[in-house]
Each structure stands twice: as C-alpha cells, then as structure tokens.
Image: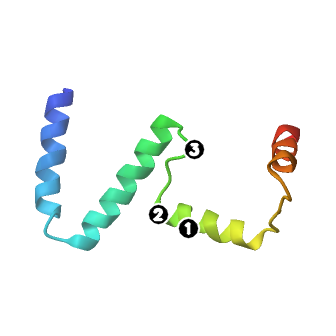
Amino acid sequence: MTALQLNTEIYRSLGIISEDESMLKKVAKYLSNIARKMTNDPALMSKEEFFARLDEAEKSPSRTFASVEELDKYIRSL
C-alpha cells in the first residue's frame, strides 16, 4: 500500500470516527504517542505527562538564590 493510499484510508476512518468525541480523543492520544516516539523530542508530551511532571516538580524542594551571580554559579555547576 502506498503512502497516498494509507493517507486516504486514515482520513476515511477518521471521517467515520469523527462523530464520537471519546473515540477521537483516544485516536488523538494514540497518534500523539506514536509521533512523539518517532521524533524523540523530550519536549513533546501528552497533557497528562505534562501535568504529572508539574505535580512532581511542585513536590520537590525548591531553591532560591540571593543574586543572579549565585544562580549563574549554580547552573554552571550542573
């Protein structure tokens, strides 16, 4: 099957699925996961992953710096 035929099949299937919002959400999540795996871009993540990372960051201890120089020194030490 050629890429054009595959695209046609995908769009035809999406036309059928488009009437069911919950099914569209599942398809969108699935496609997002596939695309993320192909690009290997760590910045690409699902909404669930994004908010899970925010929750995790809020639980970890935060750091404060008295000056920009202190912040710069800390970042360079990483």
User: Is residue 28 visible from the viewing direction of this image?
Assistant: yes
Mark 1 vs 2: CB contact within 8 A: yes
Applied colour scheme: rainbow
63 w.r.t. 58: above or below:
above
Which residue is label 2 attached to? Answer: 47
Q: Quadrant of residue 64?
A: bottom right
- Label 2 vs 3, first from the N-terminus: 3
Q: Is the residue marked by circle 3 packed among few (<14), some (14-19), or many (20+) residues within 10 Å? A: few
SS assignment at label 3 = loop
x and y percentages locating residue 11 in the rendered image: 14, 47
Mark 3 vs 1: CB contact within 8 A: no
SS assignment at label 1 = helix
Q: Relative to residue 8, is residue 23 drawn left or right?
A: right
SS assignment at label 2 = helix
* Residue 7: mark: none
* Quadrant that contains the N terminus: top left
Q: Relative to residue 12, is residue 23 drawn left or right?
A: right
Residue type indicated by callout 2: Lys
Residue at image position (14%, 33%) is 5
Which residue is label 3 attached to? Answer: 42
Which residue is label 1 attached to? Answer: 51
Residue at image position (88%, 40%) is 77
* Quadrant that contains the C terminus: top right
Residue at image position (31%, 58%) is 27
x and y percentages locating residue 48 in the rendered image: 51, 66
Residue type indicated by callout 1: Phe
